[in-house]
Image (spheres, helix red, strand yellow):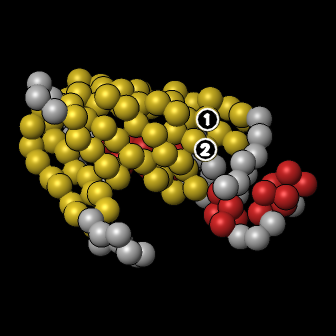
Amino acid sequence: MKAVRMPIKNVLILRLNPGDDLLEALRVAVRENEVQNAVIIAGVGSVVSHHYHVVASTVNPPKEYFTKGDAAADILSMNGAIINGRVHAHVTYSNEKVAYGGHLELGCEILTFTMVTLAEVDADFDRWDHIGAIEDLLAGV
């Protein structure tokens, strides 16, 4: 396990509009606001369609199972990270019967609105899997 404490640089709150594609709107906001590394700490709203994938095997790299559909749903939560400008988001939806979700894909159209909160940090998340990465982060390398 690796852990590191770091200050939050900025909090960016996004309000996405009806008709926006959730993932594309996140990508545009990240690009336009020059966000390099952040954690997605919250997301709520509603959609008229969904598209996500989940892992479908127990070996690396795992197979993936994709789900896509047209139906109104609430966004219960969203989390993930912006890794060197790339959006890696997971989302949980619900309807009147069940909650479901996974890794966010293109094709999730916003119904009413969606709010997403990002916390920017000074870290290079790509380096976390390398030996000494935490020590480098702490040392500001």
Q: Earlier in the sequence, mark 2 or mark 1?
A: 2
Identify the residue at image location x=90%, y=54%.
139
Q: Amino acid at mark 2?
A: Ala
Residue furthest to the right in view is 139
In the shown orientation, is residue 117 left or right of residue 51?
right
Q: Which residue is mark 2?
A: 38
Question: Quadrant of the image for the N terminus?
Answer: bottom right
The answer to whether residue 128 is above or below residue 7 is below
Mark 2, Cα crowd under 10 Å, few <14 / some 14-19 / many 20+, is many
Of the pair 93 and 97, the residue shown nearer to us: 97
Identify the residue at image location x=22%, y=51%.
51
Identify the residue at image location x=27%, y=65%.
56
Determine contact: label 2, label 1, CB under 8 Å: yes
Is residue 32 visible from the viewing direction of this image? no
Q: Position of residue 128 (x, y in %)?
A: 68, 61
Q: Which mark is residue 128?
A: none
Q: Quadrant of residue 85?
A: bottom right
Identify the residue at image location x=57%, y=31%.
12
- Callout 1 secondary element: strand
Q: Position of residue 132 (x, y in %)?
A: 81, 66
Q: Amino acid at mark 1?
A: Ala
Q: Quadrant of residue 115?
A: top left
- Callout 2 secondary element: strand
Q: Position of residue 122 (x, y in %)?
A: 74, 46
Structural distance between the alpha carbons of marks 2 and 1:
5 Å
Q: Quadrant of residue 65?
A: bottom left
Q: Position of residue 112 (x, y in %)?
A: 23, 24
Q: Which residue is mark 1?
A: 119
